[in-house]
């Protein structure tokens, strides 16, 4: 209850002009990046990371939260209007949104998408505010052996969740773990894999890893792409949307039903809590459930607003869910929460159970912003500047990528005023580019890199405490719980294998 | 019989994994009387990386080769972008922010478009560099290198 009151009282920080400016700017930038095919809100977050050095932690986290929320709903703009989802999480939205656009109801489809995003985002944020303190308290019961098993669980789940490319995901996770071992050993005064190069003694900084993985790699992907975006631009220029068309009639909202919004949001929230699952999985499962329980399933895929509502409620609810493991255990659920984790780490804050009890004041404004973004910014942004959003697709790509590149490269210089970090960002960008081009999920590499140091430390401490007895991971109840949970996930995702439909969901 | 050749990237990852594994072994014995040593975890990770790389190479060799000419047109712009970034980083401190960034942004704009309307692109590049300068130096207080002083 104290935490809920703290979140309510911290809402006043949104009244501060500076904070509000960053939150609104974050939301608009997140929406723009999510709307442009090829760019993502993750990229917007990566570019924001260097800026966080000059902001207070609260402001940086508030801006991150609004980008996150915007990123989940912004992809629906191009998904509906030109049938190209701006973000993977909006893929299911295109199934019914674009047919509505073809019937001349594109604005109405966007209105339904906004309403679903608003509901899902708000419910996800409320559940997060209500649940996170309890999860944090429970997480205090997890001791050293349990922490190792939990981190191992997170890495295993994020690898096996990459349907059809588990060896690629496994290798990417190993690459992340390798990067994490470079530098000074955490328990003994020994440097590893530095090869006498003093810049590597402190290890590889998080900033160039994130900027390289998400910004520079994206620019290289776009540079190597042979896709002709002229067709998308031409299609976007033909679309005309009026402001008044956005408001969905009450009769249609009633037809969709409160239960659909609620169920889809809950599905999205719980999918969000799983490492690596992400918005596309959440929206897919919610959409499938909406079709399954519908009295007229044949209308889905032909412009049924219920499909849009289910998909968008779920992917925005993912935001709240993904923050639960990030805040309570320091395990990011997706790339954006991984960068948020970076914002915390850069500011010297260690996520985990103690965070919610010792530094709840830093986290509360972020959660208030998540709710504010869902309830106020989503409908307001769509209504005020919605008719112009579709023009975003027509922005000059040469200028856009030049801006992104200079912000990314100079941004990586900010942390240490050293060109070494710029070279590291370039190196990570080239690595991530090749990983992506060869079908490797970069999120598993990032998770390996982020969780690697703790994974190793807890493994060594656990075995030191048990005098080298590995059965300690089965005899400690907290550890046994996560070992069994890992086996359950392996059974359902690898041995039993999910249905063909689920296997068809593109990874985030 | 046609045998599909795995991408060079997989061989590079295998080579790096083997090199990492050997370096990890060079750190010393993985287990000592006091417990696990700093080499234990890297040996584990390096071993796993070798296994995954080998599986992927074998998978690629076993899969049916594509028909010749099935792949789309190739684009090498990304290599030029990497080279441009590399040179930019080298020149960043000695040449200062404005000169290095101005040329760098202009090159990128040309790489992502075409070798036309160069004057317009040069003006856009200068505008981008100035805006980025104002953002970093004035708004966020980041000291950027200058040619003099």
Image: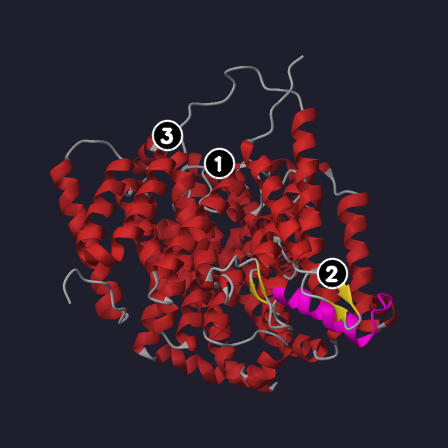
Q: CA distance from mark 2 to mark 1?
A: 64 Å
Q: Say if mark 1 contacts mark 3, CB within 8 Å.
A: no
Which quadrant, please, contains the C terminus of chain B? Answer: bottom left
Q: Nearer the viewer, residue B85 or B105?
A: B85
- Chain bearing mark 2: B
Residue A206: x %, y % from top left: 48, 62
Identify which residue is drawn at 61% across, 81% down: A354
* Same chain letter for marks 1 and 3: yes
Image-quadrant location for residue A462: bottom right
Q: Specify the farthest residue to the top.
A: B1
Q: Specify the farthest residue to the bottom.
A: A2
Q: Specify the farthest residue to the left.
A: B119
Please name which of the two marks, 1 or 3, marks the residue nearer to the observer: 3
Can you tell which mark lies on residue A228?
Answer: 3
Can you tell which mark lies on residue A99?
Answer: 1
Q: Say if mark 2 contacts mark 1, CB within 8 Å.
A: no
- SS type, badge 3: loop
Image-quadrant location for residue B133: bottom left
As for residue A154 lying within the magenta part, the answer is no
As for residue A456 lying within the magenta part, the answer is yes
**Mark 3, other Cα within 10 Å: few <14 / some 14–19 / many ≥20:** few
Which stretch did the figure color magenta?
A453-471
Q: Is residue A142 above or below residue A325?
A: below
Can you tell which mark lies on residue B29?
Answer: 2
Residue A424: x %, y % from top left: 43, 55
């Amino acid at each position: 209850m104290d935490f809920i009151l703290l979140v309510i009282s911290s809402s006043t920080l949104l009244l501060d002009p500076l904070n509000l400016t960053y939150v609104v700017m974050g939301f608009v930038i997140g929406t723009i990046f999510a709307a442009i095919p090829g760019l993502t809100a993750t990229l917007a977050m990566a570019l924001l990371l260097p800026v966080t050095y000059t902001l207070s932690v609260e402001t940086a986290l508030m801006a991150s939260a609004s980008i996150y929320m915007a990123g989940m709903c912004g992809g629906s703009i191009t998904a509906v209007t030109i049938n190209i989802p701006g973000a993977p999480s909006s893929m299911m939205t295109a199934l019914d949104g674009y047919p509505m656009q073809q019937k001349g109801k594109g604005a109405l489809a966007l209105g339904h998408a906004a309403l679903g995003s608003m509901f899902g985002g708000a419910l996800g944020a409320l559940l997060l505010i209500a649940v996170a303190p309890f999860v944090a308290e429970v997480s205090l019961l997890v001791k050293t052996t349990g922490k190792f098993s939990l981190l191992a669980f997170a890495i295993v789940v994020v690898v096996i969740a990459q349907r059809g490319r588990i060896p690629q995901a496994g290798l990417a996770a190993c690459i992340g773990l390798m990067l994490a071992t470079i530098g000074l050993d955490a328990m003994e005064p020994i440097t590893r894999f530095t090869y006498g190069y003093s810049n590597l003694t402190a290890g590889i900084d998080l900033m160039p890893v994130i900027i390289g993985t998400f910004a520079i790699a994206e620019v290289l992907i776009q540079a190597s792409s042979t896709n002709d975006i002229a067709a998308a631009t031409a299609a976007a220029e033909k679309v005309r949307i009026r402001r008044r068309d956005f408001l969905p009639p009450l009769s249609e909202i009633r037809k969709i039903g409160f239960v659909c919004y609620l169920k889809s949001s809950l599905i999205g929230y719980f999918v969000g809590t799983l490492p690596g699952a992400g918005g596309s999985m959440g929206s897919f499962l919610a959409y499938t459930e909406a079709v399954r329980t519908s009295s007229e399933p044949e209308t889905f895929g032909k412009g049924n607003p219920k499909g849009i509502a289910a998909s968008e409620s779920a992917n925005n609810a993912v935001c709240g869910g993904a923050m639960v493991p990030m805040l309570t255990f320091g395990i990011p659920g997706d790339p954006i929460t991984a960068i948020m984790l970076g914002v915390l780490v850069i500011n010297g804050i260690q996520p985990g159970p103690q965070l919610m009890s010792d530094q709840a004041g830093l986290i509360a404004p972020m959660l208030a912003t998540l709710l504010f973004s869902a309830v106020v910014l989503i409908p307001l942004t769509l209504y005020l500047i919605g008719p112009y959003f579709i023009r975003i697709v027509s922005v000059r790509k040469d200028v856009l990528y030049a801006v992104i590149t200079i912000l990314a490269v100079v941004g990586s210089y900010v942390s240490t005023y050293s060109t070494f970090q710029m070279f590291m960002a370039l190196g990570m960008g080239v690595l991530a580019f090749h990983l992506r081009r060869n079908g490797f999920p970069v999120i598993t590499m990032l998770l390996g890199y982020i969780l690697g140091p703790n994974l190793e430390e807890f493994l060594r401490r656990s075995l030191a405490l048990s005098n080298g007895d590995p059965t300690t991971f089965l005899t400690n109840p907290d550890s046994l719980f996560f070992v069994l949970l890992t086996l359950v996930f392996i059974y359902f995702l690898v041995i039993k294998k999910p249905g063909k439909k689920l296997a068809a969901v593109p990874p985030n | 019989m046609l045998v599909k050749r795995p991408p060079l990237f997989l061989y590079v990852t295998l080579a790096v994994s083997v090199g990492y594994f050997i370096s990890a072994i060079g750190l010393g014995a993985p287990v000592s009387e006091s417990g696990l040593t700093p080499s234990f975890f890297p040996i584990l990770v390096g071993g796993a990386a070798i296994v995954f790389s080998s599986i992927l190479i074998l998978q690629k060799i076993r899969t049916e080769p594509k028909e010749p000419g099935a792949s789309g047109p190739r684009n090498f712009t990304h290599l030029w972008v990497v080279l441009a970034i590399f040179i930019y980083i080298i020149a960043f401190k000695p040449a200062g922010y404005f000169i290095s960034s101005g040329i760098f942004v202009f090159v990128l704009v040309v790489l992502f478009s075409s070798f036309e309307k160069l004057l317009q692109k040069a003006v856009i590049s200068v505008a981008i560099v100035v805006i980025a300068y104002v953002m970093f130096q004035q708004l966020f207080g980041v000291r950027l290198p200058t040619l003099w002083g």
